[in-house]
Amino acid sequence: MTQPVVRIINLHKSFGALEVLKGVDLEVQRGEVVVILGPSGSGKSTMLRCVNHLEEPTSGEVWLQDVQINAQGANVNKVREHIGMVFQSFNLFPHLTAKGNVMLAQRKVLGRSEAEAARIADEQLAKVGLSDRADHYPSQLSGGQQQRVAIARALAMDPIVMLFDEVTSALDPELVRDVLEVMKELARGGMTMLVVTHEMGFARDVGSRVVFMDGGVIVEQGSPEQVFDNPQNDRTKDFLGHIS
Amino acid sequence: MFDLTRKYRQRSLLSVLVVFLLLLTLASPAFAMTGGKVTVDRETGGQLTRFTFAATTGADEAVSRIDFLFPEGFDPSKASVDVTLLEGLKRIDAIYERRIDPKTGVVTVLFDPAVPPGSNLFMQIREVMTPIAGGTYVLPVEYRLAGDSAGAVPHAIDGLTFKYKTPPREEVISRWLDGQGWVTAWNNVKFLNLFLKPQQFVRAVPLLFAGWLMSLALVLSAFPISIVGGLGTAFMKMSKVPPVRWLASIYINVIRGTPLFLQIFVVFIGLRTTGLRFPDFVSAIVVLAFNSSAYLAEIFRAGIQSISKGQFEAASSLGMSYWQAMRYVIIPQTVRRVLPTMTSEFILLFKDTALFAAVGIFELMLRSQNFVSRSGNLTAYVVAALYYLIITIPLINLVGRLEAKLAQSEHGVAAPTSKRRGRRTPALLSGPDFDTTAAKHESR
Ligand SMILES: Nc1ncnc2c1ncn2[C@@H]1O[C@H](COP(=O)(O)OP(=O)(O)O)[C@@H](O)[C@H]1O
Ligand SMILES: [Mg+2]
């Protein structure tokens, strides 16, 4: 087997006295789409945020390919360049246009030229179907459009892996489809993805693996068919029963 | 004691003068008038002026007539003449007649009897209208002696000069106002006369202008320094290193917790006592910048922390460093948010420059105060108020407009339907990633 893109080993995370992650192990191979399910508060976001070090693990190891991001003296910013993250609340930069959002980090972090950054921004905006919105400010875009700009912004950095944290949860139902469509397209293109979502259809259709978390640990994982059609764990059964 | 020495000094000065005059008289040559001198009692032209002429008549000749040949442009037609004659130190009566030729501008004084030889002659020609243009003028003076024949060429005293300046424009306007009926009527109202006297107004405007420039120069020099200092202090206050944070806190609290007036005195008087001397202007800028930095630090910190934590996380997740995120993402958004408050701080600081009047910096306040105490009229304060308002009113308006714009761009953000608003609001304004409380961006 080749080297995994992301490797999480015995990850623990506490906020003060509250232990949120209680020993998580996970390996993600190149091209895999790992869908993470679980009830609210089970630690899905925290785990995802540990992957790009927005949260500092209390103990355990997080690796991106051959670099341990939570090692002493690791160049966190350098590692993050290669990890794209999309948030539930979009977090577009409101003072920049859609194109400006996609260009900023290309210029400042990757040091790309203005022209190259602009070309790549146009490409990525075209991919998410927003060529005609390039010069709009976030406040002039719908939620779904903003989220697609956020995805384009992350993709412009040529990430090795993409993290999605409930990216459709803040959207009107009619806008969810467009965003999921973009993500499906991305998966088809072979992007390695970690997706926290409540969209069961997406998990079933696109996921190469489904991970079920509860109480800060991974309770069960397997192919979508295994987890959805034949769940082994009672808590998984319970959760899926409530959802569908 | 002090008074005595002064008196003594005055007396000794006087005796020197007497001895000098005596020597002058003794040394007088045989030919007539010596020591001729002309002075004027006004510093500027274009007004009725008193000319004083002083001379000593010759030792053996009696003067019967003196002609003052006023240059072109001078109008002595309404002049009066006053003569004082001293024989030695004794005053003697002079009997004289005055003639004025308005066409030629010649003032003639005929003495009968003639001025005795060796007399000191003082003459005042009052109410001569002078031309407005300043400069050094020559006043030719001619005289005749009692024994001269009628057709003889008169004696002349050459090279008697006097000088005055061209009055400044406000002086001219003020004099013109003196002659206007409505101005007199206006000034008859006690309140108007005290606070809005037109003549004082036109005089105060140019005089206070320099003070206004000084006040502006102070605040315009200090404020940019405050912005840099305030930003630095704000980041110190958000630092992860406790002593750095404490230092910033102490500085901010001490400055904000004490009056600016006290800070000014500490720097101006305190530093002088310790022997450290800077130009007053520099000291003033230092105090202002120090003071304002503390206020701006708090404004900036609040502004930075009001930006959602998600913005910083989004920047970080793209690989930006702390300072890159600050520079390209957080600060640009902060600037828009703090611009109104910053402008208000600028207005406060501009008004605070008035406090420097107490330490003798000739800014707007001190200039108006000086003007008032010299003129006994309060109009200069009104002029000073107007000078402050020229700056503050437009800025106050600007603050209002900036606030309205900000409110519109932050709350009026695409909210077409209430349904959408209902769903977006929690995510955008109070969602878990959008920490509206004390989101702390700490430096690493
Ligand atoms: N910054 C934080 N400080 C304190 N508690 C936190 C913080 N972030 C998350 N938590 C807590 O950790 C738990 C797991 O949160 P999260 O990872 O967001 O769960 P999920 O994404 O699965 O809903 C929750 O109880 C939450 O309140
Ligand atoms: Mg979550």
Image (cartoon, rainbow, N blue to C red):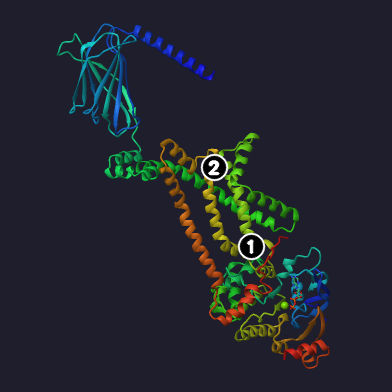
Ligand 1 positioned in quadrant: bottom right
Q: Quadrant of the N terminus of chain A?
A: bottom right
Along the horizontal axis of the image, is B44 left or right of B240?
A: left
Label 2 belongs to which residue?
B356
Please provide percent x and percent y for residue A117: 60, 70
Q: Position of residue A110 (x, y in %)?
A: 66, 67
Query: Residue B143: x and y, percent?
Result: 23, 15
Q: Quadrant of residue B116?
A: top left
**As shown in the figure, which amino acid type bears the numbered disc 2?**
Phe
Question: Callout 2 environment at 10 Å: few (<14), some (14 to 19), or many (20+)?
Answer: many
Q: Is residue B197 above or below residue A178?
A: above
Tag 1 and tag 2 share a subunit: yes
N-terminal of the two: label 1 or label 2?
1
Q: Which residue is mark 1?
A: B304
> What is the secondary structure assignment of the residue under circle 1?
helix
Secondary element type, mark 2: helix
